[in-house]
Image: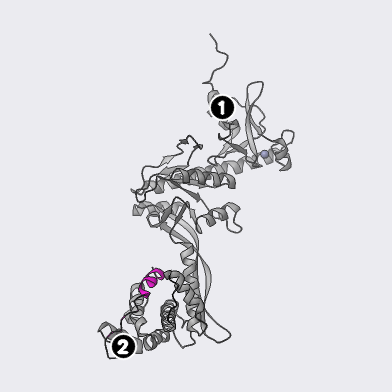
Amino acid sequence: MSISFNPNAPAKSTDTLQVEMVRRVSNGGIIDVSAWLPTQTEEEIHFLRTKIRQENGERFSCFCCGHDVLLRKHEHGGHYFAHKEKNAAEKAKCLYQQKGIISLEERNRIRYHGQREGSRHIKTKQLIEKILCSDPGFSQPEIEKTWTTFADGWRKPDVASKWNGQPIQQIVFEAQVSNTYPQVVAERTDFYRKQGALLIWIYDRLTEKEWRTLHADTFCSNGRHLFIVDEECVTISEAKGQAHFRIYSQRPEVVPFKRPTDNRWGLEIIQKENFDLIPFSSLSLDVDSQTANYFDIHDDQRIVKHKVLCAEVQSGCSYDALEKSIQEFIKNNRPIDRKQIEGWAALICGIESKRLGEPIGTKLANAVGVLNLVYDHHPNFFPHLIHTLDRLKIDSPDQRCGQWKKRVNDFYSGLYKGGPIPQPHKKSSELLAYIYS
Ligand SMILES: [Zn+2]
């Protein structure tokens, strides 16, 4: 007995396909339709037809114009993809239009781009998987396993794993090689947040010149960190047995500049680009904000602004703004003694002078002059200065010379100006530890 419909038969495609290359929106994968259809059964395709038409079901988009496409079936039995809204495709001047004539050359060009993008996506997922497998802190990664919840429909994460260093349900890595639509990015981020999972978007490259909107979106919502994978990440991760990712970041820093008005050295803020290999274990993970960061951009911004104010006070400017800044840090609005504000500013300028090699806040001949200023005028801040330079390892004994050398040696033998060491200013310790953490 012959059956009139065989769900197990391979799906047929029409001879001429309307939209030849499509993108699966849930994972960004690119599909070459005529090659792909026969790898699916009739049952799978008919199931998908329904899924596509459901509200929270699966979505496919045209690789050429980006508008939604639907699976259709020809009266002779072949399947094909067609634009959901013909007008939208027409407006976008899509090459895959029903009546448009598309040259073979153009057809091949689109196919070439599609296949290349598809293979980039696969490659990126493989790199992520290898990185996670290298680290015993990650559970065996699950590749494209479907997550289902009653309220939110379903999602297929590219790579998901548990990370035992943190009380987070799961870490989900999504390879981002193509322009996923911002709406999809937002929806997906929301979905994982509700599940108590953390979604990390991973790119396989940075565009050299102009960033794509999506790079900027991801970078800004992840506290100025952008994850990238390459072969070197895998090599390092496997060698160290610890997952490493390349993270592009922009971190505020202070640099010295000579003020033309009075020839004193001030500090100005720059944004330093970094492109470092960072161990995953050193990141702070946060499900609520969906961030994975190795520095806190807001903390950094406050700290550099504070350093600038210290340089201004040291060079004789009004100390009101610095007082306010300290009050905000210590969350206490009580007025601060002027002498203490000056001592604090001198201390920070001393550390910055040694760190940056210029006499910050002054027009002295060299950086060490600023350290001697602290010694001469702010005895209670002098012990902090010695300890912080030591902790940051920026004043090695063989570098010290002259007066400063003797003063440090005296300090370590318990002497200050021939008498006992002054009490270090008590309230500074915590703030100092925060600024130079
Ligand atoms: Zn199109």
Q: Does residue 72 belong to the magenta stretch?
A: no
Residue 71 placement, left or right of 298: right
Secondary structure of residue under mark 1? helix
Residue found at the far bottom of this picture: 418
Q: Quadrant of residue 21?
A: top right
140, 286: nearer the viewer: 286
Q: Secondary structure at mark 2?
A: helix
Between disc 2 and disc 1, whose residue precedes? 1
Few, some or many residues within 10 Å of mark 2 (<14, 14–19, 20+): few
Residue range (magenta): 417-437
Residue underneath mark 1: 45
Task: Examine the residues drawn in magenta and state their main secondary structure.
Answer: loop
Residue 229 can be seen in this image: no
Place of residue 361 in the rendered image (x, y in percent of width and height, measured from the top left): 48, 83
Residue 427, relative to residue 61: is it above or below? below
Residue 422: percent from left, percent from top: 30, 84
Residue 202 position, x and y percent, is 49, 50
The image quadrant of residue 244 is bottom left
Name the amino acid, label 2.
Answer: Lys
Identify residue type, mark 1. Ile
Q: Is residue 154 at least partly visible in the picture?
A: yes
* Figure quadrant, ligand 1: top right
Residue placed most toward the observer, 2 or 263: 263
Whether residue 436 is in magenta: the answer is yes
**Which quadrant of the rendered structure holds the C terminus?**
bottom left
Q: Which residue is mark 2?
A: 406
